[in-house]
Amino acid sequence: MGGIRMKQDNILKRWTDTVYGGLNMSWPVVIIYAVLTAVVTAIFLIVPVFSETSFYYMGVTFEAWIFFAVIIMANCRTPLDSALKTFVFFLISQPLIYLFQVPFSSMGWNLFGYYRYWALWTIATLPMAYVGWYIRKKNWLSVLILLPVMFVLALDGVGSLMFAFRHFPRRLLKGIFCTGQVLLYAYVFTSDLKQRLAAAILPFVVYGILSITRPPMELTVNYFLPDHPVLTENAVIEVADPKAAEISVYQTGEDSMIQIHAANYGNTDFTITDGSQVYHYNLEIYEDDGGHSQIRITRID
C-alpha cells in the first residue's frame, strides 16, 4: 500500500511540477492559449445544451479564469513577465468571447455593453499578476497572496455544492472544480504541512463564519398584486409570519404596488385592509433552477 501511495504522490507531483512551472509560456503560446479559451467559452455560452450548466458559468464567473491565470503566472520567469502575459491573455480572450457571440445573440453588438465589467478586471490583472507571481516561492508569502483568491473559490465552490444538493445535479461540476482548485493550490504552492493546512482550511473557515453571520439571501422588490386592487394611503398590511417577509405599501392609486423585503426563502399569508376592503394573499419566495430568487403571490378568496 505504501508503494502504491508513493507512486500516486510521484505522479501527482510530476503533473503539478509540469503544469505549474514546467511549461514554456512564450508569447505565441499565450496568444494561442487566449484564443482557444475564448473559443471554448463562447461555445459553452452559445450552444443551448450548456445553458445554466457548470460549463456555462465558465463565461460568467471567475473560477475558470483564475485557473487559467494561475497557470500563466506559475510559468513566467519574472513578476513583470507574469503581469504582461496575464494582461494580454485577458485582453485577447475576453473581447473574443463577446465577438464570437454577436452573430448568435438577439442583442447583436450591444452585447459588448457587458464587456465593461471584464475590461476592468483585465486592467486589474496587471498588478494582481505581478504580485501573484510570488506564489512560486512556495512559502508563507505564497499562502498570504493566495488566500483572497482561495476564499473566492471556496465561497463559489461550497455555494455551488449546496445549490447542487437542492437542485441536483446543477452546478455540481462547478462546485467540485472550485473546491478542487483550493486543495490543488494548497498542495502546489506550499512547502510544508503547516502552510498546506493553513491554505486549505482557512478559506473554508472564513466561509463558515460568513455563512453564520449573513442571511441566506437578501431580496427587496416592488411588486404588483395579481388582482390589481386600487389601494389608498389608508391601506394597512398584516403579515401572518413577520419573520418570513416584511411587506409594505409602496405605491397607491391605480398602479398600486407593494414592497417585499425578505432574508429567507419561505411561505406566508398576508392581509391588506383598506377601509371596508379586505384582501387576502399568499406569498411564496423560492429559488428557481437557475438559482434566482422568485416571488409568487396568489389571491386567497
Image (cartoon, rainbow, N blue to C red):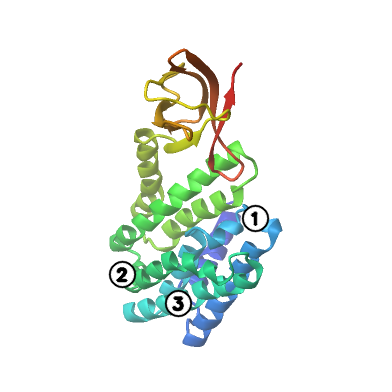
* Mark 2 residue type: Val
Q: Which label is found at residue 51?
A: 1
* Mark 3 residue type: Leu
Q: Could you give the CA–CA distance between mark 3 and mark 2, rounded to whole angstroms? A: 19 Å
Residue at 47% in and 86% down: 27
Tell me if residue 258 comes above or below residue 288 in the rendering. above
Residue 210 lies left or right of residue 174; in this view the side is left
Residue at 50% in and 70% down: 112
Kindly tell me whether residue 91 is visible in this rendering.
yes
- Quarter of the rendering containing residue 82: bottom left
Residue 235 lies left or right of residue 49; in this view the side is left
- Quarter of the rendering containing residue 247: top left
Of residues 123 and 236, the one nearer the viewer is 236
Of residues 146 and 21, the one nearer the viewer is 146
* Mark 1 residue type: Ser
Closer mark to the observer between disc 2 and disc 1: 1
Bin the neighbour count of mark 1 within 10 Å (Cα to Cα): few under 14, some 14-19, many 20 and up: some
Label 2 belongs to which residue? 131
Q: Which label is found at residue 91?
A: 3
Residue at 37% in and 20% down: 234
On the image, the x and y values in percent for residue 96 come to 54, 75
What SS does tag 3 mark? helix
- Quarter of the rendering containing residue 105: bottom right
Sooner in the amino-acid sequence: mark 2 or mark 1: 1
What SS does tag 1 mark? loop
Sooner in the amino-acid sequence: mark 3 or mark 2: 3
